[in-house]
Amino acid sequence: MRSTMMDVPLTLPYVLERVQRYFPHGTVTSLLAAGMDAEGRPIPAKHRYTYADMARRAKQLANALVEAGVRPGDRVATIATNSYRHLEAYFAIPCVGAVLHTVNIRLHPEQIVYIVNHAGDKVLLIDNVLARLLPAILPHCPTLEKVVIMGPVPQQIPGALDYDTWISGQPDTFTYPEIDERAAAGMCYTSGTTGNPKGVVYSHRSIVLHNLGMTHPSGFMIAEGDTVLPVVPMFHVMAWGMPWAVPMVGANSVFASVFSDGPNLARLLAEEKVTVTAGVPTIWMGLLAEIERAREAGEPYDLSGLRELVVGGSAAPEALIRAFDRHGLRIVHAWGMTETSPFGTVSRLPAGVPHDSDEGYRVRAKQGRVPPLVDVRVIDDENRDVPSDGRSMGRLVIRGNWISGGYYGDETASRNSLVELRGPFGTEQWFDTGDIATIDEAGYISIQDRAKDLVKSGGEWISSVDLENALMGHPAVAQAAVIAVPHPKWDERPLAVVVLREGAQATPEDLRAHLEPRFARWWLPDAYEFVESIPIGSTGKFMKRELRDRFRDYRLESADSPA
Ligand code: ADP
């Protein structure tokens, strides 16, 4: 029997119309670079307008794109930081039926050329502060027909258009083409930590459903009355979908462009009375240092309106969660990846567990549970579910309406990313995340490692993430990364690479004594290397591959360590 319900396509034009109709007074605040100071540092300047302004300009941009020959299915690239103009592009490009391709600005120009060509981008919108990349890119990207510079054009770049001038003559109303909800709306390349970057293509439907998931109580719990600052870049997994989800529910947006350092962020969070913010752990480490400095100096920031700092992208150490709690600030741990749009799990506490109890911290340090419409399983080498005991490790697989089922133009990678599993609904395809996790009885997952970062000692797995988190709980340790180094007897053994806090001291024996009560002896790192800094990649994560290269020939002294 057929239902009597309407079938309304889930598309982004609907979201833009909703924002314009119901939340015209919602605000978008952007901290932008107004120029450079004498030492070459960007000078911050604030821009503020309303969602009514945003929607009008997004429609002007949509008209300009159509006039420039952009047709449904064409790819339009952005090389841009978080700002109001980028937000306009987030709406305008999918609303003309084209595909918003956000390019990671921190990639090497050769990698940018690779992905622009792979995607076949037709138009490029680029921030003025990034226009210096153009000479290294343009000659090698034959598909690019037009380059538009967002913000005052810094120098004469032949053929480049100024964004504001380009859209200014256009009408601020727009008639949408018919858009299939399953058509491509956005694309993002994985940052290529292994091999060439791979393109993930989001549909209108997946984005709209993801918006609902993000704002849902089991997600980021965002609603009208909130002011949201996504520190996570718009070029990295679509800033976790927040540029669409936040206006859709009428919350205000705040963007920080190039100003993601501790002092600028702390000031912006306080001035704008931000209620929810989101980013990777390294960002919050910088913020914490600034909050502590300011408090000691007797000039604390007023962050009383800040309800939650969502942390994802890498594991949030329990020590970081506790440290923010001491300032009355709540960290919420989330997990996801480019292929999962990225909302996979969020660690919300089960009813009745206080956030600052030992049990509360134990749960909050996990990556959490899936929202409605997404499911996960943890499987062993024979594709059987591992026990839900919170201890047994296996491959994390995921399935749902905003989970990618393949990669753009790469059949082999697409095939290899999927695994067929039996379940209550028959045999289904699941996406293999490449992460190693445990799952407990209540369905909370805990990420142990990326499969390629695991330390395999004598055939057993050691979780580098667990060791790192425990090390970062030592008062003298600022940052820690644990990597596998070759070992003659055990194949691999863990080496801890540690950055000490300024002025703090610790010996390998101190760190070992700190870990001993927490881990089986054979898990303990064989050696500790103290370094000035740990290399950080384009998305703010530790670059373990670089560390592994650096310590490839490391000689461990004892051949019998795990005894
Ligand atoms: P890249 O693979 O280039 O880093 P992604 O953002 O897609 O880009 O990375 C997703 C990966 O980041 C996940 O597969 C996982 O390994 C890691 N990750 C994300 N969130 C967390 C988290 N909360 N804890 C541990 N690892 C995480």
Image (cartoon, rainbow, N blue to C red):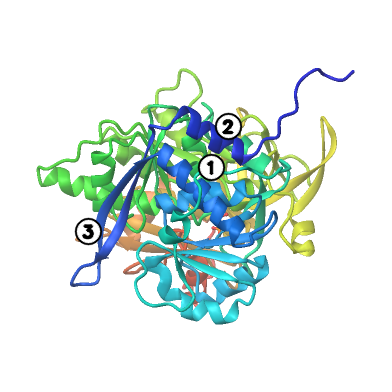
Question: In x, y percent, where is residue 518?
Answer: 44, 44
Question: In x, y percent, where is residue 173?
Answer: 53, 42
Q: Amino acid at mark 2?
A: Leu
Pointer 3 residue: 504
Which residue is rendered at x = 63% and y = 77% of the image?
A: 142
361 displayed left or right of 73: left
Label 3 – label 1 distance at C-alpha: 60 Å
Comparing 122 with 557, the one in front is 122
One can see residue 124 in this view: yes
Q: Earlier in the sequence, mark 3 or mark 1?
A: 1
Locate the N terminus and report the quarter of the image it occupies. Answer: top right
Q: Amino acid at mark 1?
A: Thr
Q: How many marks?
A: 3
Q: Earlier in the sequence, mark 2 or mark 1?
A: 1
Which residue is rendered at x = 78% and y = 42% of the image?
A: 384
**Of the two numbered discs 3 and 1 in the rendering, the one whose residue sits closer to the viewer:** 1
Q: Is mark 3 within 8 Å of ligand 1?
A: no
One can see residue 238 in this view: no
Corner quadrant of residue 308:
top left
291 displayed left or right of 71: left
Q: Secondary structure at mark 1?
A: loop
Tag on residue 173? Answer: 1
Is there a contact, CB below 8 Å, between mark 3 and mark 1?
no
Tag on residue 300? Answer: none
Pointer 2 residue: 212
Label 2 – label 1 distance at C-alpha: 26 Å
Which residue is rendered at x = 64% and y = 59% of the image?
A: 70
The vertical placement of 405 against 401, above or below, is below
